Image (cartoon, rainbow, N blue to C red):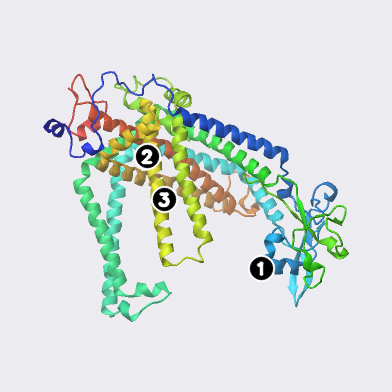
Amino acid sequence: MGKKQSKSSPEESAEYGEPRQFDPNFKGPLLKRSCTDIICCILFVLVILGYLAVGILAWLYGDPRHVLYPKNSTGSFCGTGQNKDRPNLFYFDMIRCATSSFNILANPANGFQCPTTQVCLALRFNWIFYFGGFDLVNGFNAKEIGIRIFEDFASSWPWILLGLLIAMVTSLLFLLLLRFIAPVMVWVLIVGLLGAGAYGIWHCYWEYDNYKKKSAFISDVGFSTDLKIYFQVQETWLAFLIVIAIGEAILLLMLIFLRKRILIAIALIQEASKAVSHMMSALVYPVITFIMLLICVAYWGATALYLATSGAPIYKVVALNSNNEACKKINASHLCDPLVKRLILPRMPHYLQRHCLSVVRELRHRPGQCTLAGAFASYYWAFHKPADIPMFPICGSFLRALRYHIGSLAFGALILTLVQIMRMLLEYIDHKTREAQNGCARFILCCLKCCLWCLEKFIKFLNRNAYIMIAIYGKNFCVSAKNAFSLLMRNIIRVVVLDKVTDLLLFFGKLLVVGGVGVLAFFFFSGRIPSPNSTFRSETLNYYWMPIITVMFGSYLIAHGFFSVYNMCVDTLFLCFLEDLERNDGSAQKPYFMSKKLMKILNKKNK
């Protein structure tokens, strides 16, 4: 026991396993490995094949015209075929639609449709209610807005692409410059937080002192739905003062006792920037991932559209006059054929034949992180950088992940998906039973939602680090997750500090990119910055905010893609750094692989 305690640092605990021992044969990510989680790989392939089969069946039996075009009472589509010149649907009696929309029992029987005759027209109309009757006027056409927006995109797309290019260059420069400006930025942000906290304390005390002199107590206000009233009593500002003071004290204590760990985090951030500069091909990976995701989403959307419109339509009879004796026998279960105007029911009154309604039946029926982790791990375990870095590390890591670890990647994604399904089911139960819930039930559901949210965040964190260990050692998902969790728990304080410092820095970077490009786009598309091209004028835009929103949204996606690669690099180097500390001691036989700056911070050196 004494030998274990002499080797363990204060952050290490036997509860989370023993520190890794020196292995003279370990030189970075293992090349000799075998397939992992084969059962999950087979299940994943079967799911993909089943997904393709569902898509083929949907394409064979689906008809997207049910979604793209309206349909009249006879089952014909408006705007195509024989009704090509009549694209709009006209409801004969809008009162029927208004009254049936509030009838909860009648809507399912009617197929959630309006029980009135519907015909295709060439013009678009809206109904205006006036003393129980109508006037017919030209309606608001959403197609016109769509055409105007399309015209805006058609005239401004080169400048939108230019804005996205500026966002990409800004993100790249920010990541590459972090190796030089990371220490300054981190300390400026920390000092800024301290300054903001100090101002908050002063302002809260000033407000508290003012309302104290006015003898404004919360007991004089009582209960009120107007929240502004509570900002006019001294107790509110006293509470704010206490909370901000506690936060300021915690931040000061962290600076005092965790200063060395903050320096380690800054050094790892700088090292990550250096690694990205040596492997610029890693920055292309988010583009590949985005294209693959776009293909999957497009396939899913098309399949869902065809599935939703597959099956033959069902035409049912709706009794519009419930006072008639013959109509009382109609219970929305009788079928009819609208094309031949014949009801599949004997002795049906003739005037009911016009009210057949159509109901369309519905058929109810991740490897990027591992690739980047393997490449960045090969960078850390190269003793002489960049000379010892293997050629094309991204390609080699991608091929290893694709050949050996598809099952492990699918296993981690499956666990995360199950948790997300549980969250969705809980939200569905909450939505359906909200009116019948009491205070205790709402409290229990709120606690369950909070627990599942925390579990999802933990699974994402565990998956990320498990994929790093898979990329390095080639073990299966469960073993890799256990080893990663144990390694992180033996260094939990360093984990927390690095995570928060990295999050703070990357959040500031995203804010810088999106905010800067957004402001530039606003001044350009609003006409405050003149266009250097005479073919484009901001005055010709119908809605100048659409290009601005597009540029800002695209800038966020670009910044998120670049920074996700950088964040993965930081996490990978951090796990390698922790293993370097446990495996090696700086001797000639067991030298450290970390940078000289990290060794200087830890007062270590290679002999």
Does any portion of residue 529 appear in the rendered image? no
Which residue lies under the disc numbered 1?
Answer: 102
Q: Residue 154 versus residue 535: which sits nearer the camera?
A: 154
Q: Residue 155 versus residue 306: which sits nearer the camera?
A: 306
Look at 26% across and 19% down and name the residue there.
Answer: 24
> Which residue type carries mark 3?
Leu
188 lies left or right of 226: left
Which residue lies under the disc numbered 2?
Answer: 462
**Residue 541 on image: x %, y %:** 64, 52
- Mark 2 against mark 3, which lies toward the viewer? 3
Q: Earlier in the sequence, mark 1 or mark 2?
A: 1
> Which residue type carries mark 1?
Phe
**83 up-or-down from 58: above or below:** below
Q: Quadrant of residue 122?
A: bottom right
Q: Residue 260 versus residue 115: which sits nearer the camera?
A: 115
Look at 60% across and 41% down and name the residue there.
Answer: 300
> Which residue type carries mark 2?
Leu
Label 3, label 1: how far apart the Cα atoms are: 36 Å
**Residue 403 on image: x %, y %:** 47, 23
The local secondary structure at tag 2 comes to: helix
Which residue lies under the disc numbered 3?
Answer: 452
Q: Which corner quadrant holds the N terminus?
A: top left
Look at 65% across and 54% down and name the residue there.
Answer: 542
Q: Quadrant of residue 487?
A: top left
